[in-house]
Image: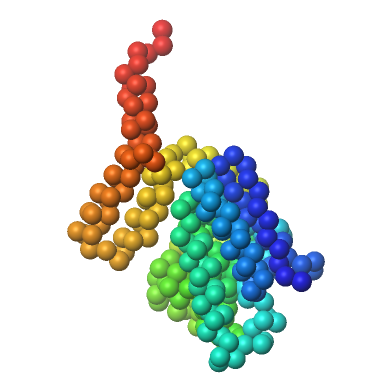
């Protein structure tokens, strides 16, 4: 059996849950990737009404253990290419969602499971979470964008140390390295995530979407290109889909209102 996915909506937040087969960790295989694509189709259709997407696991021990080992065992030089490309398409779709995405990690995020988390905008972890870019232990390289995303988060030299050794590291180190943005107890994680989602929901969805695009593009753009990108994004914020005009009007009205008697 494959890992199953489900979605739940609470207000403007979509939570995507990974449900592993009984007694096994969540893993990724073609069936799971197809299920992810269906979920992403749904999320993209509803994106204008969403403020955030949370990706988490129903397993208390594993976020995701990476690629299904039984699928990997069938790979050869001819079939590995389509497998790598399939994973890249999925991770790129997750990274490109037009809303903030948060990976909520409790338990192990290993190999392709860590690559799945890295495709999200932010990683919040419980203090018992464990991380590892472990592909070299099985004779493989990162196949779903980990060589790019891990280095961008922790620096190329540190990424080399992590992948050359394949070692596991805890949530506290993940935060120190810049791989995760926050860690704490499971109870504190729930509270922190709720507080974060409330803050995000209070802001403009259009502006957050445009900022996500700008931040992704900025490392690859010149100052002149960045100025053009920010101009275009600012125009969208003031366009028919944006709410900058209304938010400015409301802000000024509150500022100019007389103090209560």
- Using the image, determine if residue 108 lies above or below residue 143: above
In x, y percent, where is residue 220?
30, 66
In x, y percent, where is residue 66?
62, 73
- View extreme (top): residue: 261
Write the residue at 37% across / 26% down: 250
In the image, 172: left or right of 8?
left
Does residue 173 appear in the picture of this structure?
no
In x, y percent, where is residue 132?
57, 73
Q: Can you say which quadrant of the picture contains the N terminus?
A: bottom right
In the foreground, 45 or 101: 45
Q: How many marks?
A: 0
- Using the image, determine if residue 64 lies above or below residue 199: below
In the image, 31: left or right of 167?
right
Write the residue at 38% across / 44% down: 207
- View extreme (right): residue: 22
Does residue 15 appear in the picture of this structure?
yes
Q: How is the image coloured?
A: rainbow
In the foreground, 161 or 78: 78
In the foreground, 17 or 199: 17
Write the residue at 58% across / 75% down: 111
- View extreme (left): residue: 224
Quadrant for residue 260, please give it.
Answer: top left
- Using the image, determine if residue 259 lies above or below residue 109: above
- View extreme (bottom): residue: 77
In x, y percent, where is residue 148?
43, 73
Q: Can you say which quadrant of the picture contains the C terminus?
A: top left
Write the residue at 31% across / 49% down: 233
């Amino acid at each position: 059996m494959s890992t199953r996915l489900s979605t739940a909506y609470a207000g403007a937040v979509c939570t995507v849950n990974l449900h592993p087969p009984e007694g096994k960790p969540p893993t990724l295989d073609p069936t799971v990737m197809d299920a992810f694509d269906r979920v992403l189709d749904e999320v993209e259709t509803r994106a204008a009404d969403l403020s955030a997407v949370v990706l988490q696991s129903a397993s208390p021990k594993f976020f995701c253990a990476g690629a299904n080992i039984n699928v990997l065992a069938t790979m050869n030089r001819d079939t590995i290419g389509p497998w790598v490309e399939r994973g890249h398409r999925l991770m790129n779709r997750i990274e490109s969602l037009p809303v903030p995405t948060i990976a909520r990690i409790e338990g192990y995020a290993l190999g392709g499971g860590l690559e799945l988390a890295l495709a999200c905008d932010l990683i919040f972890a419980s203090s018992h979470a464990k991380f590892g870019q472990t592909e070299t232990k099985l004779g493989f390289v990162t196949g779903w964008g980990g060589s790019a995303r891990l280095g961008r988060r922790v620096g190329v030299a540190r990424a080399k140390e992590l992948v050359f050794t394949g070692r596991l590291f805890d949530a506290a180190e993940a935060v120190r390295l810049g791989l995760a943005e926050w860690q704490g107890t499971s109870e504190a994680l729930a509270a922190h995530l709720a507080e974060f989602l409330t803050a995000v929901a209070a802001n403009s969805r259009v502006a957050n979407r445009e900022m996500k695009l700008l931040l992704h593009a900025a490392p690859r753009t010149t100052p002149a290109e960045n100025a053009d990108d920010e101009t275009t994004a600012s125009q969208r914020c003031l366009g028919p889909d944006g709410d900058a005009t209304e938010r400015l009007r409301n802000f000024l009205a509150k500022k100019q209102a007389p103090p209560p008697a």
